[in-house]
Structure formats: C-alpha cells, structure tokens
Image (tube, grey):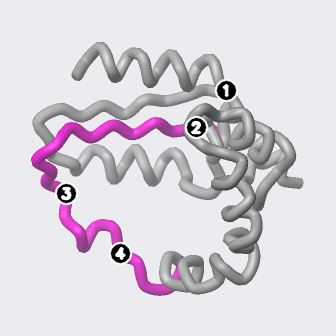
Amino acid sequence: MRCKYKLAAGPTPELILNAVCSPFYTLKDVSYFLKSKAFEEGQRHIWKYLMEEFDLPALGTQYQAPVFYIHGERDWQTPYSLAKQFFLHIEAPLKRFCSVPDAGHVTMLDQKEKFNDVILDILEQI
C-alpha cells in the first residue's frame, strides 16, 4: 500500500542506501541513527505532538527569510491542496511553491532528477 500512495512509513532500503552513499553522512552517523530506533519508539512522542497539538497557522505566516515549498503532487501525508492553500497566506521577501509531479512525501527519492532541478532553480533565484 505504501508504494501505491507514496507514503513515507519508515526506513526503506532505498532510504538507507541513500544515507550510506551520501557525502553528508558517515557510516557512524547512519549507525547511530539506526541504533536510535527513530522510526520506532523514538518517534512516538513527536508523532503524538504533531497529530494532536501542533498548530502551524498559530506560528504565523510572516517570514523575514525566503520560503520555498518543494512538494510532491501525490503526497498523501501532507496533502498537496492543503499545503498550497496554506502557502498562499505566507508573506516573505521571496517565496515559491515548487510542484514535483509523480512524487509523494519523499520527493527527493520519488523523483530525484526533478527534485534536483528544483533545488538548482531555487539556488539560481537566491
């Protein structure tokens, strides 16, 4: 079901491989992350907070820095339409909503090339 709806539900082999091959993480970093059980008991408290208490609009919609949303159009965890609707209320010196077709919640893995193109495009703007 995760593949059909593009849900990010834990450390997939592809996610682990990307972390291991990333120039930003060492094997020691990956090892600590896996030992922390962040996808098990370690996330229970943050999930509870996010689902029951967190209120994004209460934080405000005015920013002093540029704001970029990179969003998979098939993201079921952070619905595209809700993200787009909230984004319209944001006030920032520079803002851009970047849509990535055929991508779900883990946009950078679902559509690597398109995600990289968006990042490079953003870098050119700033």
Report which residue position mark 1 lands on. 111
Q: Say which amino acid is labelled 2.
A: Gly
Secondary structure type for disc 2: strand
| Secondary-structure class at tag 4 | loop
Crowd band around label 2 with a 10 angstrom C-alpha radius: few (<14), some (14–19), many (20+): many
Q: Secondary structure at mark 1?
A: loop
Q: Earlier in the sequence, mark 1 or mark 2?
A: 2
Tell me where residue 40 sits by quadrant: bottom right
User: What residue does disc 3 label?
Assistant: 61
Contact check, label 4 and label 1, Cβ < 8 Å:
no
In the image, 83: left or right of 22?
left
Label 1 neighbourhood size at 10 Å, few (<14), some (14-19), many (20+)?
some
Between the C-alphas of marks 3 and 2, the distance is 22 Å
Reading the chain from its start, which is encountered first: label 4 or label 2? 4
Q: Residue at x 63, y 17 (%)?
A: 113
Q: Secondary structure at mark 3?
A: loop
